[in-house]
Image (spheres, coloured by chain):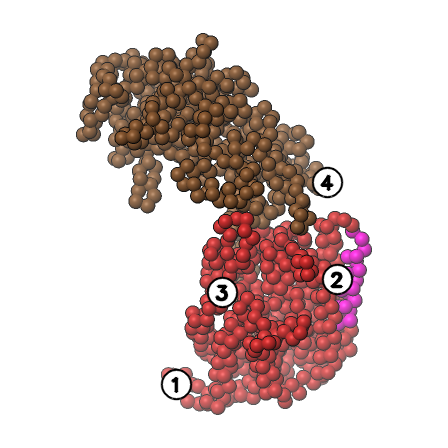
Amino acid sequence: MNTQIRNLFLVTVLLFGLLIAFTSRWTVFGDESLRDNALNRRDLIRSERVPRGRILAADGSVLARSVQQRSRDTNVKSYKRRYPKGQAYVAPVGFSDTTLGQLSGLERSQNDWLAGKAVKLATAVDKLIKGDQRGDDVRTTLEPSVQQAAINGLAGRAGSVVALDPSTGKVLAMVSVPSWDPNKARTSPDYFSKLNQLSRTHPLTNRATQDAYVPGSTFKVVTAAAALDSGKYTPDTIIDGSNAQSFSGHVLNNSGGESYPSAPLRTQLTHSVNTAFANVASDLGKATMDRYMKRFGFGDLPPLDYPADQMRPSGEFLAGKKRGRFIPATSRFVDVARLGIGQDKLQVTPLQMAMVAATVANGGRLMKPHLVDRVVDADGRVQKTVDPQLYRRVMSSGAASDLRSMMGDVVNEGTGTAAALSGGVQVGGKTGTAELNIAKGLNDLWFIGFAPLSSPKVAVAVVVENTQGFGGPVAGPIAKQVMQAALQSGAGR
Amino acid sequence: MKPRTREALALLPSALLITAGFTAIFLKRSDFVGNTSLIYGGAFLALCLVGHLVIRFTARNADPFLFPLVALVACFGLVELYRIDESFARSQALWFVIGLGLFAATMFALRDYHQLERYRYTIALGAIVLLILPRFPLIGQATNGAYLSIKIGPLSFQAAEFAKIGIVIFLASYLRDTRQVLIHGGRKVLGVSLPPLRHLGPLLAIWGTAMLLLIFIRDLGSSLMFFGAFLALIYVATGKLRFPLIGIGAFAAGAYLVGSKVGHVQDRVAAWRHPFDPILFGAADVTPRPPEYGTSYQLAQSLFAQADGGLFGRGFGQAEIGTTISSGGDVTTPLLPASQTDMIYALITNETGLLGASAIILAYLLFVHRGFRVAILARDPFSKLLATGLTAVFALQVFVIVGGVTKVIPLTGVTLPFVSYGGSSIMANFVLLALLLRVSEDARRPT
């Protein structure tokens, strides 16, 4: 019998070993996915007990702060989030609410700082002694006057504006309309659940980073950059821009049927001649177009300090039966001529187009866009400073300088005159009109640009959705107001 | 060193541990650190010493490790219960006093435990009645769809806790009688020699009972516990592996059939397979509606709590359990429901981490080791079978509840011995401990 009893003990050892193995699996090896599970509210609940740090604009005005509340039922103290500027900043700042289980935008990407989790050694000792914790303040790069100018410019029309400091990558403004009120969402659950159901206007998505638009003629800037930097073209290279040429077996027309049978590249951009740029792109070929698009950041998630799942890449997008996918410009599904004029299957975000404008403005050097300027702890010690960082070297400074002067012509004498600033400040830019519904004349209207032309301090991308008219007259004036505000505020402080 | 001296010394670490545990919780509450934790530690040590003296007087040669190991896991439980709510720890301490009384009574009254053999059919009948009672109207009571407790007036009583001891006593005694016949067998069917029907009958009856239990009390865990102990015993009694193998097959087949037919068991299995399914979880899509518990809510929260603990744990009192106290004074922990009973292992893991959890599993394993050691040293078949059965049923109970909490098997509501909150469990397991010590005393008494 004793042998059997020993065997039984061995079986018990095996069974208990299994228990420890499974406990290890949940506690150590597979704990991350459990912690991140949306159904798991432990971190959120814990965070209610610690006041979150504030989120500040570049001038120090408060965009989000925590206020202590005492529940009437349980008499438990907890901290709730307030957003003093309401819906103006909700796209970049995001939303944090434990009851709704929501955490988005900077509130999410900077959560470790805001919640006081990311602790450096010096403060860790302090926290041990003082006991009470407080999250760190996050100061953003957002300029209130620029942000407000963008909101005023859109004037309630659906669309988006992104303004960057081209030399540092600072995001000066990020606006998405229609917006929503995070304070109201906190107090009225019905309001928040209704927002979720508005699929057509989808106010909860940040149009600047999450929405896909056809770039239209603004993309000619990318084509022109490829042409100039590749060395095959100069601004004076003569190109055939006659109307109604055939590409890939289909006839392509110019806007208003204009024809520029032999004009230099500079003129073709000034008048946004479709056939000319289709010829340029076809001549450069798919591989060159693909190389320059990648350098501009197409095909990748933007390197913004913002939650990855609240951003999308830009590029050629092949729609699929179930879900589509991004494809390189070298794919056989790409019509390179129409790619060159911003049509084909292109889907881009306003942030990406602002990055294109900023690259040209910054001498061909694309800086990493960022929303966070610095992190400061409760005692005013700077915990982290975000320095300007080069993301990609896209083109030579010579090519960029040529392209800047060509984009100056667009605003001085071409399609973008509505964006011209008063007081002798020269502006560079490019308009875009992406046709959505030809019968009704509805388009997505674009303007991308920068100012001052000689040494740009601000780069901007504006899109107004689903509107009649052209990019220049509709989106141009918005860009003008935003750039003016940026220059007046002395952006890039 | 004499066994009893060894035992007395081994109790000290437990007392220190409980003092440290209470101190940690006081520190967390941070209003004061008085001498209260010392008082708790001292009181616990005093209780242990009483138990030790009882053993010293009644079973001076018995195994010196069983009792200190019980004290060790018990102090884990007490600290966690105190951390959930003071009232739990206070009642639990009371149950310990009563359980210790029952322990002493068993130690004194059952000096010759062989007399139990005489009443084996009465004991078996009693155990079965205990198991079936919860299903009767008026006194029966369903918890989460399983019928495990009897409620008379304000007192609720976990019948299965006592039934397990009765069934082990019966089986040990019955198999002592019939083991020879079972070994030598009668007819051969399909190349397997089967024992005569007269002896096979009761065995089939036990399988049938386990199946009925599944259908009747609708609890996979308890049936697994009982049937597992039975298989362990029949294996030790006959020395033939084929009996437990056939038994496992029969149980699996039965469990599969019942599992696919009985709604409650079906729900448990579904929750086990997909704990994070939003529908099973009962996730409130339109927040902030308070979460209604779905069938997998408890298991999912258990896994979340363990992940929250990590390797070292959050520390005593640092787990999020969402304690709420109703106006009637009932304490609930909505973030980890039943944290004082079914989920206490998850709470221990949350607060003391993988290390603490492994320590407690190891303590149980050592207890089981000593239990089987008692069986090996025992001098007659009944004693061997009794000690084996008691140890096996104890080990299986730990496996069923910890396995349920860690998603090894579907979660069912049995208690973690000496740790979970509850009088029936404490009392029954003290009786189990007393019986083991009695067998050990007989085995180790110098002749």
Q: Residue furthest top?
A: A424
The label on residue B15 is 2
Same chain, marks 1 and 2? yes
Q: Find chain A in the image and tell me its colour.
A: brown
Looking at the image, can residue A362 be seen? no
Q: Tag 2, which secondary structure?
A: helix
**Does residue A194 lie above or below B351 as drawn?**
above
Please state which of the two labelled residues, at mark 4 or mark 1, is closer to the viewer: 4
Same chain, marks 3 and 2? yes
Q: Which residues are magenta?
A: B33-51
The label on residue A129 is 4
Tell me the residue that label 3 is attached to.
B268
- Is residue A371 shown left or right of residue B333? left
Q: How many marks?
A: 4
The answer to which of marks 1 and 3 sits earlier in the sequence is 1
Q: Residue furthest right?
A: B35
* x and y, in percent, of residue A239 in the image: 24, 16
The part of the image, by quadrant, that contains residue B327 is bottom right
- Is residue A368 shown left or right of residue B321? left
Looking at the image, can residue B218 be seen? yes
> In the rendered structure, the residue with mark 3 lies on which chain?
B
